[in-house]
Amino acid sequence: MALYSEKVMDHFRNPRNVGVIEDANGIGEVGNAKCGDIMKMYLKIEDGIIQDVKFETFGCGSAIASSSMATELIKGKPVKEAMQLTNKAVAEALDGLPDYKMHCSVLAEEAIQSALEDYQKRTGDVILQEE
Ligand code: FES
């Protein structure tokens, strides 16, 4: 069996939504101390919807694929849904990651959470989690 799914390879080779949003209203940056990889997420939120999302990832292929997939999963979605995105959902959408690469998808979840927290701080908007 191939180590990486075709989806992982596709998102690694052709990552979606790479770049910077100049007028982002939520920016999150996280890193993994062990591997040294860094992920930065930019959100443009309007009327409670993620209108645009871009990322910059300095990291391994799985981290790049995870950030790319994560941006696709939250683009156009309500902030509440983005808040609930888990690394497991990102990995599943990629048709799985090897066990020892699951932490790379955690970076994507954390980067989005961090960007949403930044958005809440900047705007005073409170994103309530659904029960
Ligand atoms: Fe560091 Fe993948 S090895 S995020």
Image (spheres, grey):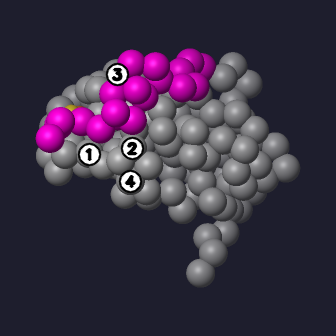
In the structure shown, which secondary structural element does the residue marked by tag 4 occupy?
Answer: helix
Question: What residue would you read off at disc 3?
Answer: 58
Question: What residue would you read off at disc 2?
Answer: 94
Judged by its main secondary structure, the magenta piece is loop
| Of pointers 3 and 4, the one earlier in the residue sequence | 3
Could you tell me which quadrant the N terminus lies in? top left
Q: Residue furthest front?
A: 1
Q: Quadrant of ligand 1?
A: top left
Check residue 97 in the rendering and tell me which mark sits there, or answer none: 1
User: Residue flagged by tag 1: what amino acid is it?
Assistant: Leu
In the structure shown, which secondary structural element does the residue marked by tag 2 occupy?
Answer: loop
Could you tell me which quadrant the C terminus lies in? bottom right
Q: CA distance from mark 2 to mark 3?
A: 19 Å
Q: Are marks 2 and 4 in contact (CB under 8 Å)?
A: yes
Question: What residue would you read off at disc 4?
Answer: 92
The magenta span reads 1-20
Residue 11 image position (x, y, % from top left): 42, 28
Give yes or no for residue 17 being in the magenta stretch: yes
Give yes or no for residue 13 being in the magenta stretch: yes
Q: CA distance from mark 3 to mark 4?
A: 22 Å
User: Residue flagged by tag 4: what amino acid is it?
Assistant: Glu
